[in-house]
Amino acid sequence: MCWETKEQPMRTYQQFINGKLVSRPGQSMIEVENPSTGKIMAQTPNGGREDAQEALEAAHKAQEAWAAQSAAARGAYLKQMATLVRKHRTDLARLLAEEQAKTLPLAYAEIDGTAEYFDYYAGWARLYEGEIIQSDRQRENILLYRQPIGVVAGICPWNFPFFVMARKVAPSLLTGCTAVIKPSSVAPVTVMEFARMVADLDLPAGVLNFITGGGSTLGEALSSSPLVDMVTLTGSVEAGQRIITASAANVTKVSLELGGKAPVIVCADADLDLAVRGVTASRTIFSGQVCNCAERLYVQDSIAEQFADKLAEAFAKVRLGNPFDEPAPDMCSQINAEQLEKIDSMVKRAKADGAEAITGGAPLNRETGYFYAPTLLGNCRQDMEIVRKEVFGPVLPMLTFHTLDEAIALANDCEYGLTSSIFTTKLTNTMEAVNRLKFGETYVNREHFEAMQGFHAGWRKSGIGGADGKHGLMEYLQTHVAYIDY
């Protein structure tokens, strides 16, 4: 064991507005808990409408001059940010693990992925382009320009706060937009540490701003402001609905990545050991607190008992611990007591409705932290809450199917539509699933985890718009068509 018990100094952060780290006299602070120890590790400002207005005015003022710079010049700042992240890699990863109870290897992966993300979008500076459209007239050119949408308000989640911050900052700045970023008040520390680093760059004032505070006040203030041209949120369905309502008066564009209830289909012909590894990885990564995680399991009836035994054995072997334990655990604590209670309540209701815990099924009584045992639930029905609503924890309800048609129908019977997967060795099964599953992503014979060059976008209540790759870049651009007669 190598869990560090040495007391760390309390970190206190400021807002980053118009190129400066600023404090508002008498402003209350949000205390950030280390889930592994239960102790307060940092404080961030509990910002409100004044902070939002000041940041948005700065972003609005800076946007025209920022857009006038070349895309290559803007991309150079993203490269500087990537360099900063790599320079402070160890400190950032340890902060991330501390504020979230995220395993240290996964924290490093998030930090490294963030640096790569800044570099990836910097590379788009000379690649994105407009179009020449054929005219009906002999002496006319029709030119389609792609221009920045303007001021972007980015609202980040607590589960992958650092990477999702980059997901909003990189395409915003590269395309000539300016941005105001609000991290989650549950896990704002790593993002605000990055804001301190950005303060030392020669980035023009107002181009990028970071403010902290509660979603019900600060988030609403950002979403409802006429100064905002686009709101991008990663969060719950309920948060997305509030954003849509708040932005409606100004008809502000929204790009929303919301919840998921990803189905996994395991066919009788599948490599069962591969499927067990993929499903276990998809259900236990960051303690199940990932929107694209496997959330419900459909297994062909002829192998259901065999697969359940194998998966239960794998779940039981998942190593739980604190982020800095050695060797590193597979899974840590849930983010807080509220999340643990939500998971436990859903499992209790499922049991009362007839579900059976094949393994797990209860919180773990540990000295510190909010641990829930990796749980496989059998005897589940399609109409159960545990099958239909997002758990956001290491709990997987299992159902059976007889034909692939039945499995696809059950998988599509859902209000969400973010990710899905199938395990099969038959090309016909693969193509049926890929062509008929109504989800933004389908993974075949692998865990659920997207690539930055893809397009992470949901159907139905899982969102509007998307992120990553060329199509994610286009979210931050609007078209301007010029008809030129000569």
Image (tube, rainbow, N blue to C red):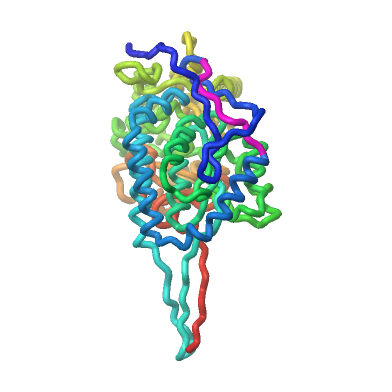
The quadrant the N terminus occupies is top left
Query: Residue at position x 47%, y 25% from top?
Result: 99
* Image mark count: 0
- What is the magenta segment's predominant secondary structure? strand
Relative to 298, say whether 359 is above or below: above
Query: Residue at position x 41%, y 34% from top?
Result: 299
Query: Residue at position x 56%, y 54% from top?
Result: 151
Residue found at the far right of this picture: 249
Q: Which residues are magenta?
A: 39-48
Q: Is residue 67 left or right of residue 469?
A: right
The answer to which quarter of the image holds residue 355 is: top right
x%, y% of residue 372? 48, 19
Please say whether residue 402 is visible from this viewpoint. Answer: no
Nearest the eye: 411 or 196: 196
Relative to 467, say whether 423 is above or below: above
x%, y% of residue 427? 30, 49
Please say whether residue 136 is visible from this viewpoint. Answer: yes
Nearest the eye: 55 or 143: 55
Residue 42 colored in magenta in the image: yes
Relative to 362, say whether 173 is above or below: below
